[in-house]
């Protein structure tokens, strides 16, 4: 065997047979990079909270305005009747000429109702005047409102009084009338209308909705301007479903 052959067939060294172990050394994160990432995370969270706040602020504000800081414009001057009282189906009404009038015929219009005896004292005259003035100041909306005087003592009103309020002995529901004067039994009327504490039926003006439900009562000696605001709010709120005329 020649020296060349011996060299070719000689076993290789151990170092040549074993694989080499390669190590990669990576740089450690710097404190400055961590701070920048934390800042970006905090900024993102703050931005998300601001977006949520902007979205919820109107809702929160509306609840606070309604429940915590309720403005005066939201309160009613007159007393709301809760629940509203429907006109009794058996309530006996009569026109001044004695003809019976069905209670259901009062439905279909907003009603401003005065209760007083036929002799009509100073308190009655004041409410009838307020009833008429309020009706006239409603402008074109007055076609959605009727004036009703319920005479609860069986006495026929004086002609001068009827003329002053634009009524006559022939003026009665149904139909749009300048004023309707109807006789009613006082005891039976108590099943529908009710005065405030310490007051009488004749002290108030009663507001009835087009469904025939008594839903509001003015204070005694009501203030015209504040009462008008109540009525205007009711007319605006019902504009979508209430139409003039029965």
Image: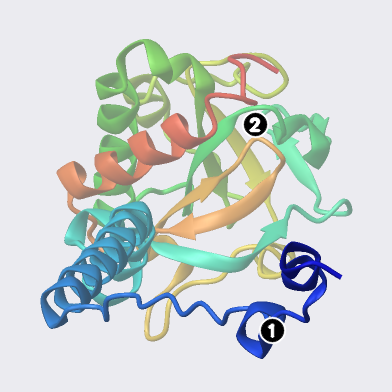
Question: Dot 2, crowdedness within 10 Å: few (<14), some or many (≥20)?
Answer: many
**Which residue, as the protein is rendered here, is positioned at the far bottom?**
14
Residue at (41% x, 17% y) in the render: 141
65 to the left or right of 157? left
154 to the left or right of 68? right
The percent coordinates of residue 108 (x first, y second) are 69, 27
Say how many tags the image has: 2
As rendered, which of 85 and 171 lies closer to the eye? Answer: 85
The percent coordinates of residue 3 (x first, y second) are 73, 69
Question: Dot 1, crowdedness within 10 Å: few (<14), some or many (≥20)?
Answer: few
Residue at (56% x, 70% y) in the render: 194
Disc 2 versus disc 1: nearer the observer: 1
83 to the left or right of 194? right
**Where, quadrant-wise, is the N terminus in this rendering?**
bottom right
71 to the left or right of 86? left
> Element type at marker 1?
loop
As rendered, which of 101 and 3 lies closer to the eye? Answer: 3
Q: Would you name the residue on which mark 1 appears?
A: 18
Above or below for 187 versus 97: below
As rendered, which of 63 and 112 lies closer to the eye? Answer: 63
Above or below for 189 versus 234: below
Q: Would you name the residue on which mark 2 appears?
A: 96
Circles 2 and 1, Cβ within 8 Å, touching? The answer is no
Residue at (48% x, 72% y) in the render: 195
**Of the image marks 2 and 1, the number of the one nearer the N terminus:** 1
**Which residue, as the protein is rendered here, is positioned at the far left?**
32
> Element type at marker 2?
loop
Residue at (82% x, 71% y) in the render: 9
Query: Could you give the CA–CA distance between mark 2 and mark 1, rounded to whole angstroms?
Result: 126 Å
């Amino acid at each position: 065997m020649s020296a060349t052959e011996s060299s070719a067939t000689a076993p290789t060294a151990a170092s040549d047979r074993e694989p080499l172990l390669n190590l990669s050394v990576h740089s450690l994160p710097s404190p400055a990079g961590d701070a920048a990432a934390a800042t970006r995370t905090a900024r993102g969270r703050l931005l998300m909270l601001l977006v949520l706040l902007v979205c919820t602020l109107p809702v929160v504000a509306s609840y606070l305005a309604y429940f915590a800081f309720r403005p005066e414009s939201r309160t009613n001057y007159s007393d709301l009747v809760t629940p509203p009282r429907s006109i009794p189906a058996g309530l006996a009404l009569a026109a001044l000429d004695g003809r019976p009038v069905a209670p259901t015929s009062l439905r279909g219009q907003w009603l401003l109702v005065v209760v007083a005896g036929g002799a009509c004292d100073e308190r009655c005259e004041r409410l009838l005047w307020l009833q008429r003035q309020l009706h006239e100041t409603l402008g074109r909306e007055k076609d959605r409102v009727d004036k009703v005087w319920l005479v609860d003592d069986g006495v026929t009103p004086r002609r001068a009084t009827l003329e002053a309020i634009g009524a006559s002995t022939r003026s009665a529901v149904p139909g749009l009338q300048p004023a309707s004067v109807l006789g009613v039994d006082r005891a039976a009327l108590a099943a529908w209308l009710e005065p405030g504490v310490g007051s009488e039926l004749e002290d108030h003006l009663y507001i009835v909705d087009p469904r025939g439900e008594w839903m509001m009562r003015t204070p005694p000696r009501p203030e015209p301007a504040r009462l008008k605001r109540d009525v205007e709010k009711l007319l605006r709120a019902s504009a979508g479903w209430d139409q003039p005329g029965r």
